[in-house]
Amino acid sequence: MMVELFVLGCTGVVLFLHGANFFFHVLTQHVAIRSLSFFGSVGW
């Protein structure tokens, strides 16, 4: 019983980290595109 809970917990943590990493990657990409377009419009 304890082993199953441990495996489930580890799987949950790994999935959570993957999800957070994916979300952070999308967020930073979105912010980078926004700031680039903003600076591009200011430059012109």
Image (cartoon, rainbow, N blue to C red):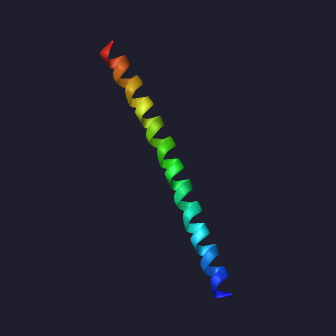
Quadrant into which the C terminus falls:
top left
Residue 36 coordinates in the image, percent (x, y): 38, 26
Q: Residue furthest bottom?
A: 1
Pick whichever, 20 or 35, lies toward us: 20
Count of labels in the image: 0
- Is 20 displayed left or right of 1 in the figure? left
Q: Residue at x 41, y 23 (%)?
A: 37
Q: Which corner quadrant of the image does residue 34 belong to? A: top left
Looking at the picture, does residue 11 appear above or below residue 28?
below
Q: Which corner quadrant of the image does residue 13 belong to? A: bottom right
Quadrant into which the N terminus falls:
bottom right
Q: Residue at x 64, y 81 (%)?
A: 5
Residue 6 coordinates in the image, percent (x, y): 60, 79
- Is 40 displayed left or right of 19 in the figure? left
Pick whichever, 2 or 29, lies toward us: 2
Residue 26 coordinates in the image, percent (x, y): 51, 41
Q: Residue at x 43, y 36 (%)?
A: 31
Q: Residue at x 60, y 68 (%)?
A: 12
Looking at the picture, does residue 24 appear above or below residue 42?
below
Pick whichever, 26 or 8, lies toward us: 8
- Is 28 displayed left or right of 6 in the figure? left
Looking at the picture, does residue 40 appear above or below residue 8?
above
Residue 25 coordinates in the image, percent (x, y): 48, 44
Looking at the picture, does residue 6 appear above or below residue 38?
below
Q: Residue furthest left?
A: 43
